[in-house]
Amino acid sequence: MPNPIQYSVVVPVYNSTDSLIELSDRLETVFKETLKASYEVIFVDDASPNPETWPTLQKLQQLPRNISIVQLTRNFGKPGAVLCGFSQVQGKFVVMMDDDLQHFPEDIPHLAQKKNHDIVIGHFKKKEHGWAKRVTSDMKGWLDSVLLGKPKHVSNGAFVLLKREVVDAVLKLQVAYPYISALLFFVSKDVVNVDVRHGKRTYGKTGYTLGKLVGQFLNFIINNSSLLLRGVAVVGMLFSTMSIVLGIYYFVRSFFQVVNVPGWTSMIVVMLFSTGLILFALGVIGEYLIRIINGIENRPSYIVRHKRTSNYDK
Ligand code: UDP
Ligand code: MG
């Protein structure tokens, strides 16, 4: 029997090449020399369009290290890739980190110091992101608390160390539009932060286009709460109340004043406005319906094309 694996590192990969080699080398040093613990790495290629990504992973897999590689059939997005990685882990603890070295492998021992907690989240002291990303992530942080019940005292992040039990519980949750943090906070509130560094992206560029970010945000807000639906209902009620009051006012006024010019403009403005509101509300309801239908269909959040598990025994 080989040693049981202590740590599993799950890395969703999108378009990276050189950073993967450096990441693998630095992980080897960290686990061999600093933590002195057995580990495995699971790289999940989220169907990167870059033709060099998969061959790079194949080469890494040949090294005398415990590296497994998986390729998805198409681009499922980061949550799908992460869940796929989770389904492969063997370790007692699971680290989730990005492929672009913005998360430092050398910080894993710091996360591991608090491994008696269910969820240890790396907190970036100084964010090396553009201002637009910072504003959206601040907004998301606030929403994380309001919508997901994220404990207020911690900040969310993508560099995380988890107990294996948490990962196993997450895998049991069947959701159509997964959002990793939502799943984690659903499973446990035993969450702590550890300060870590956040590197600039020196290799490649972000895999998140504006479209992907908006899509992720919609998943987040629609699938994790009925906030939007309720918001629409409140706005709709406000406007319909206002229209009724205005209608009464004009009706009463017509008894006391002779109206020479029929109020075409105001009519049309009110009509367009209310039609717009109704359509907007219908759109939102439609969006929910689509998601309910997809949920009932029970589609997987990822599909595997190739998989090579390591046969390297420590
Ligand atoms: N990622 C992915 N699928 C995608 C886009 C990104 O698996 O469609 C992964 C990517 O490989 C990386 C992580 O998500 O490990 C974060 O991506 P990125 O560095 O592009 O985002 P940022 O750091 O700008 O938030
Ligand atoms: Mg990044």
Image (spheres, rainbow, N blue to C red):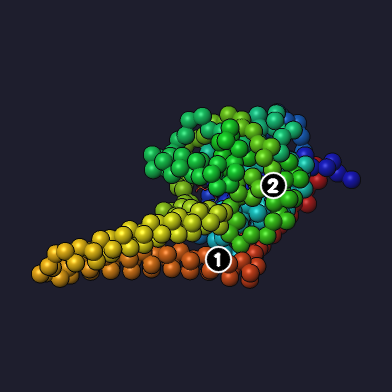
* Above or below, 113 relative to 71: above
Report the amino acid beneath label 2.
Val
Determine crowd level at label 1: few under 14, some 14-19, many 20+ residues with C-alpha closer than 10 A.
some
Number of on-image labels: 2
Mark 2 close to ligand 1, CB under 8 Å:
no
Task: Tell me the CA gap for discs 1 and 2.
Answer: 22 Å
Q: Which mark is residue 252?
A: none
Residue 215: where, in percent of width, then height?
47, 57
Expressed as whole percent of the image width and height from the top left, the position of residue 60 reads 65, 48
Q: Is residue 234 in view? A: yes
Q: Which residue is mark 2?
A: 187
Q: At 69% from the left edge and 43% from the top edge, which residue is drawn?
A: 188
Residue 125 lies, with reference to residue 251, above or below; the image says above
Q: Residue at x 61, y 66 (%)?
A: 295
Secondary structure type for disc 2: helix
Circle 1 sits in a helix, a strand or a loop, which is it?
A: helix
Residue 244: image quadrant is bottom left
Decide which of 218, 311 is in the foreground and name it: 218
Q: Residues within 10 Å of mark 2 (few under 14, many from 20)?
A: some
Q: Give how far across and how far down residue 75 sits, in percent.
A: 55, 61
Residue 130 lies left or right of residue 269; in this view the side is right
Q: Which residue lies under the disc numbered 1? A: 291
Q: Measured from the top left, where is residue 108 in percent x and y?
A: 65, 34
**Between residues 270 and 143, which one lies in front from this camera angle?**
270
The amino acid pointed to by label 1 is Arg
Quarter of image, res 246: bottom left
